[in-house]
Image (cartoon, rainbow, N blue to C red):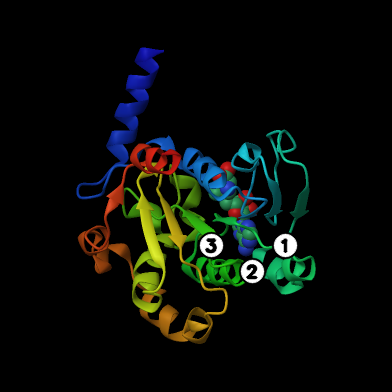
């Protein structure tokens, strides 16, 4: 067992490029659980669920959206009420299911298509359905090399992990939504961005979409500069973050 763990740690270390911060255990799932507890969430919204690994941890009611569910976890374990939408998130939000049913999620987890134009839409649509006390967590904001940030979907099966260009949501929110509070958690394996101080009526990300994508969609991390990105925020270790939440 110790040998296996050591091998795994060595393998993981080899994937990191110089200058990229290292994510630590516990994973994003433990942070999500701490947030659920902190918010005493009644409703959780998840964009991108796949096997239901992150859903299976939830104890509150949830709405899960994924065009291609492949559930392999007991997602019915702890939660009382669940809604599944097997469709793309844009279609789900266009239904207005949440407002029609007066559901205001306290916690949302964005982990769907890892391309910035999708992440931007998922973020702003989730925010519009929440209250100012809600929290949106975005997965995969901390790549550990530039290969995994590719927008080339044909290259994915050659990668150990794909974060896509989700990292861009950090500079985008820093620039266009300075009113939000951003917390970057170095949670294993590819980080978590926790966004607070939401404003469901804010239209900036809707109105400035062309400018935002014009500035960021074609930018590669290697051109933007990993140092510029990683110097732009303070990274909090997941254990520290969870301990602060749990008091
Ligand atoms: C990384 S997986 C999600 C993993 C899961 N959240 C977890 O932590 O175990 C990403 C998922 O996003 C889904 N996805 C892809 N495009 C999407 C879209 N437009 N809307 C919602 N989900 C999408 C994929 O089908 C895939 O299952």
Residue on which the image places disc 3: 133
Q: Are marks 1 and 3 in contact (CB under 8 Å)?
A: no
221 relative to 30 in the view: left or right:
left
Q: CA distance from mark 1 to mark 2?
A: 8 Å
Residue 121 percent location from the top left of the image: 56, 71
What kind of element bears circle 1?
loop
Q: Return the disc, 1 or 3, that comes first in the chain's sequence.
A: 1
User: Residue 103: which disc?
Assistant: 1
Q: Which of these two is toward me, 78 or 65?
A: 78
**Dot 2, crowdedness within 10 Å: few (<14), some or many (≥20)?**
many
122 relative to 99 in the view: left or right:
left
Q: CA distance from mark 1 to mark 3?
A: 14 Å
Query: In this picture, is 225 found above or below 81?
Result: below
How many numbered circles are shown? Answer: 3
User: Residue 129: which disc?
Assistant: 2
Residue 32 percent location from the top left of the image: 52, 45
**Dot 3, crowdedness within 10 Å: few (<14), some or many (≥20)?**
few
Q: Quadrant of residue 141?
A: bottom left
Comparing marks 3 and 2, which lies closer to the viewer? 3
Q: Which of these two is toward me, 100 or 54?
A: 100
What kind of element bears circle 3?
loop
Residue 160 percent location from the top left of the image: 43, 42
Residue 156 percent location from the top left of the image: 49, 51
173 relative to 88 in the view: left or right:
left
Q: Residue, x 66% and y 64% (percent of image)? A: 89
196 relative to 127 in the view: left or right:
left
Q: Are marks 1 and 2 in contact (CB under 8 Å)?
A: yes
């Amino acid at each position: 067992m110790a040998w296996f763990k050591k091998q795994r740690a060595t393998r993981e270390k080899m994937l990191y490029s110089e200058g990229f911060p290292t994510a630590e255990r516990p994973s994003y799932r433990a942070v999500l659980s701490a947030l659920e507890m902190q918010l005493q969430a009644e409703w959780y919204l998840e964009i991108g669920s796949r096997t239901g690994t992150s859903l299976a941890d939830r104890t509150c009611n949830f709405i899960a959206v994924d065009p291609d569910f492949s559930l392999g976890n007991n997602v019915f374990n702890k939660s009382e009420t669940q809604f599944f939408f097997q469709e793309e998130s844009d279609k789900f939000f266009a239904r207005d299911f949440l407002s029609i049913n007066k559901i205001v999620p306290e916690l949302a987890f964005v982990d769907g298509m890892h391309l910035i134009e999708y992440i931007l839409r998922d973020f702003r649509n989730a925010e519009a359905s929440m209250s100012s006390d809600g929290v949106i967590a975005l997965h995969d904001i901390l790549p550990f090399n530039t290969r995994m940030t590719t927008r080339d979907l044909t290259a994915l099966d050659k990668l150990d992990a794909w974060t896509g260009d989700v990292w861009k949501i950090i500079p985008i929110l820093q620039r266009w939504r300075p009113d939000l509070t951003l917390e970057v958690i170095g949670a294993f394996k590819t980080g978590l961005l926790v966004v607070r101080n939401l404003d469901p009526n804010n239209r900036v990300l809707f109105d400035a979409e062309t400018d935002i994508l014009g500035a960021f969609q074609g930018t590669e991390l290697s051109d933007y500069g990993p140092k510029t990105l990683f110097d732009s925020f303070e990274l909090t270790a997941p254990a520290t973050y969870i301990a602060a939440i749990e008091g």
